[in-house]
Image: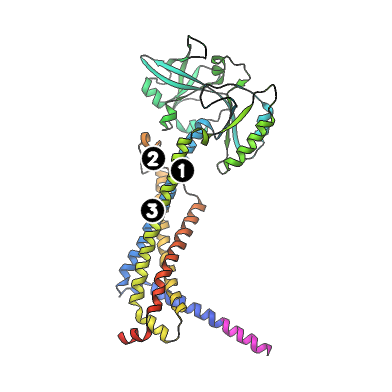
Amino acid sequence: MVNSRKQYLCTANRRNFGQLNTELFIARRLFSAKEQSPRLSRRIVRLAVAGVSVGMTVMLLAVATVAGFQQEIEDKVNGFAANFQIVNYHNNYSFQTDPVMRDDTLLRQLRALPQIRHIQQFATKPGMIKADSDLQGIVLKGITDDFDWQFFEKARVNGARLNPDSTQVWISKKLSDLLRLPLGKRFRIYFLNEGEQVPRIRQFTVAGIYDTGFEEFDRMFILAGLKHVQRLSDWEDNQISGYEVFVNRDVPHETIEERIADLVFDRHSDTRPLQRVDNIRRKYPQIFDWLNLLDMNAIVILTLMIAVAGFNMISGLLVIILERAAMIGALKAMGAGQRTVRRIFLYLAFLLTGQGLLWGNMLGLGLYMLQKHFGIVKLDPHSYYVATMPVSLSAQQLLTLNLVAFVATMLMLVVPSLFISRISPAKTLRFE
């Protein structure tokens, strides 16, 4: 009795497995070019697959462009002002700041956090450049030997790294062209402290020229030694505007901001001014709100492309079903159920969609690599802040995009497969 039951179960399993192989075999035969060659559906199916490929290429490039643009602009803003700034609590968002005291203990605690990439001291002082008959408002940003030159070295046009202990400065190419200040040129900056009637004048020498393409900041910031800001503001040697904190790219800002804020608050005492942590996203909300709008543009593009790809596949599958009506009738006459026949055409849709996504990925990734390494598509830096279209695409984004496109397309193809239930074996066989 036990042996008979085992034999029955093995036979049933073989039957189910054979049924699955039969459905897949028929779908693969329909998918092959040999089977499609003499039929009208060949061209229509090719157009459907091409539609999926083009849609996938457009979606991939849209995601890569939006992500690359957001990353590039955020990196430029962070290059000027870091991810976070630790400043005097009473400061507003002006560049005329109240000082804080250097705190070596706080620095050690912050540098011990693995999420933090770099910390540096800074100080700012607004002023006015006078070059010949031209005037331009600027912000003198004081730096020390702990300054991270990674961002400005990439943007350097000419010159050498400045010595913070000298009267050398770095200015942008925009200011250099606007005020006719070439490398090695000496010029004056005028500063006015609160309560003073006569401006203070300092003379500097252009030691380097940078160009980030971010005109809003290029027209503003001049890099100089921090001691110049201290003297202009009548600060002591241990007083600064604050600290700039750079975090690793994959670190959630909310989590690390709370940790930094806790350490800063713990260091408060009666002898030290109260400090706060400024998030760069809150300091320049107009820039990051604009970047967030790009996500909506990407969502609209993705939705439209998935819809177009889905409708292309629906039309292709319907044509195949209509051309294969006699085959469907024959399968039903031989005892195949509705689910079995539907499964055949869903397997076929699976193969066609997979082929379209494969070609779309190959084309999209090829164009992505060309743009990433050769910068073929150029942009106007005055309008877009970058000279070439930036692209960025992670493996997770690529996999998620393919999964969403595939699942959405397959769900849309369930509807035309229901049309199979309306096909009558008697009518189709008699018509054939």
Q: Nearer the viewer, mark 1 or mark 2?
A: 1
Give the residue at x 37% y 14%: 132
Packing grade of label 1 (10 A; few <14, some 14-19, many >=20) is few
Q: CA distance from mark 3 to mark 2?
A: 18 Å
The stretch in magenta equals 1-13
Q: Nearer the viewer, mark 3 or mark 1?
A: 1
Circle 1 sits in a helix, a strand or a loop, which is it? helix
Circle 3 sits in a helix, a strand or a loop, which is it? helix
Give the residue at x 47% y 11%: 199
The quarter of the rendered structure image containing the C terminus is bottom left
Dividing the picture into quadrants, the one containing residue 86 is top right
Give the residue at x 30% y 85%: 431
Where is residue 107 shown, x and y percent of the image?
65, 30
The quarter of the rendered structure image containing the N terminus is bottom right
Q: Which residue is mark 1?
A: 292
Packing grade of label 2 (10 A; few <14, some 14-19, many >=20) is some
- Name the one closer to the observer, 115 or 295: 295
Callout 2 amino acid = Thr
**Residue 206 colored magenta?**
no
Packing grade of label 3 (10 A; few <14, some 14-19, many >=20) is some
Q: Which mark is residue 58?
A: 3
Circle 2 sits in a helix, a strand or a loop, which is it? loop
Q: CA distance from mark 1 to mark 2?
A: 20 Å
Q: Which residue is mark 2?
A: 388
Dividing the picture into quadrants, the one containing residue 274 is top right
- Left or right: residue 182 compared with residue 279: left
Q: Relative to 185, say whether 344 is above or below.
A: below
Name the N-terminal-most of marks 3 and 1: 3
Q: Nearer the viewer, mark 3 or mark 2?
A: 3
Q: CA distance from mark 3 to mark 1?
A: 20 Å
Dividing the picture into quadrants, the one containing residue 267 is top right
Q: Residue furthest top?
A: 198
